[in-house]
């Protein structure tokens, strides 16, 4: 079956991003397809590249990054959520005249159209928040 | 080639201002209209507080959500429902509400969800 | 036509009440994250109609030390079964 996953929460503050990751890994393990990961609201922090996890803790951002790359997933962070939270791609940072960027290259910035499109093209959309 | 229209039902269950959920739900519903999908919008639980008249988000440096809800009509979302039981539990009635809404019972709501292709529950 | 409802906050959230107000008889309920505390509380057992299927997520149960407090009505499942439930039911509604 074709799934999409929507993540509304930042890593670490609540368990949901971690649940979403575990669920996504299981989906792939069971032979299902993921059409899109969509990070909305605080969820955009899952795609940040400027993070360092303590040695005895897992980096959720790094795990998402690996999952996306290994399985060539489509991963989108919501533009309006991302920009105001400081999750910016290189191109976006340059456009805004900012010196740093913080979005992992495994995700791209796009609009809510991608959220609706994910519903239209998936058999199931599962939300975690 | 165009796909047949799908029915989206958005259930907005959170009060405005304290969290961003009410705004997320509204923005997502407006995005759905751009895809020319059938969109239902439901206010339920604490979400009915979004409908109160005389809101002024400016007093806490926020945009006024109540005014933003007028976009539902502008974007052609006509099927805007309010959970009757949620209103009653909060001592509210239709006179307190900012925009025109269709009161529904829990059973009607369950049927609406059944008919919907997608349910976004925020 | 049935729906899987996932509930991911504990009893103080009142999410179960909201869910049950619109859930249908043959729907399934899956409790995850802090939602698993519902599966150890007698109050939640009595409020759930008999015909609804109740599941609770093993990983979250074990993490919280609830393995011996799960009420009989609840079936403990793992992530693979979580995925399977999502495919079995035509719709999934997440309560969080």
Image: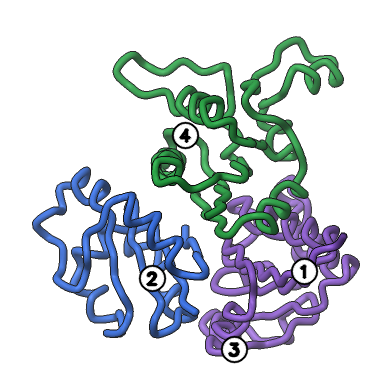
Residue ID for mark 3: B108
Residue at x 73% of width, y 32% of height: A109
**Label 1: how many residues lie within 10 Å, few (<14), some (14-19) or many (20+)?**
few
Question: In the figure, what tint was chain C given?
Answer: blue
Residue C16 numbered mark, or none: 2
Question: In the figure, what tint was chain B given?
Answer: purple
**Mark 1 belongs to chain:** B
Position in image of residue B83 (x %, y %) = 60, 82
**Mark 3 belongs to chain:** B
Q: Nearer the viewer, residue A39 or A25?
A: A25
- Do the residues at pointers 4 and 3 share their chain? no
Position in image of residue C20 (x %, y %) = 41, 78
Residue placed furthest toward the right: B74
Q: How many tags in the picture? A: 4
How far apart are the alpha carbons under marks 2 and 4?
Answer: 25 Å
**Label 3: how many residues lie within 10 Å, few (<14), some (14-19) or many (20+)?**
few
- Do the residues at pointers 3 and 1 share their chain? yes
Residue at x 48% of width, y 22% of height: A62
* Marks 3,1: beta carbons within 8 A: no
Q: Is residue A39 left or right of residue A88?
A: left
């Amino acid at each position: 079956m074709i799934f999409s996953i929507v993540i509304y929460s930042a890593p670490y503050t609540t368990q949901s991003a971690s649940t979403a990751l575990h669920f996504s890994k299981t989906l792939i393990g069971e032979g299902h397809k993921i059409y899109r990961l969509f990070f909305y609201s605080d969820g955009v922090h899952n795609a940040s590249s400027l993070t360092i996890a303590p040695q005895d803790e897992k980096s959720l951002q790094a795990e998402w990054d690996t999952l996306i790359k290994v399985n060539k997933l489509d991963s989108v962070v919501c533009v309006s959520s991302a920009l105001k939270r400081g999750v910016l791609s290189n191109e976006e940072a340059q456009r805004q005249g900012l010196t740093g960027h913080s979005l992992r290259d495994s995700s791209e910035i796009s609009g809510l159209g991608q959220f609706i499109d994910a519903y239209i093209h998936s058999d199931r959309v599962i939300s975690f928040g | 080639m165009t796909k047949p229209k799908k029915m989206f039902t958005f259930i907005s269950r959170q009060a405005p201002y304290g969290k961003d959920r009410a705004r997320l739900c509204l923005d997502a519903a407006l995005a759905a209209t751009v895809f020319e999908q059938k969109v239902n919008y439901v206010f339920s639980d604490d979400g009915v507080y979004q409908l109160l008249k005389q809101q002024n988000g400016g007093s806490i440096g926020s945009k006024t959500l109540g005014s933003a809800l007028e976009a539902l009509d502008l974007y052609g979302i006509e099927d805007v429902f309010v959970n009757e039981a949620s209103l009653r539990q909060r001592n509210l009635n239709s006179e307190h509400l900012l925009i025109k809404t269709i009161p529904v019972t829990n059973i009607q709501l369950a049927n609406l969800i059944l008919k919907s292709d997608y349910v976004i529950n925020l | 036509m049935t729906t899987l409802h996932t509930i991911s906050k504990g009893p103080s959230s009142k999410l179960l009440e909201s869910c049950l107000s619109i859930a249908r008889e043959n729907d399934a309920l899956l409790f995850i994250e802090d939602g698993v505390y519902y599966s150890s509380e007698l109050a939640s057992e009595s409020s759930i109609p008999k015909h609804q299927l109740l599941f609770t997520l093993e990983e979250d149960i074990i993490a919280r030390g609830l393995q011996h407090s799960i009420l009989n009505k609840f079936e403990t499942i793992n992530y693979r079964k979580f995925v399977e439930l999502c495919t079995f039911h035509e719709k999934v509604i997440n309560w969080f």
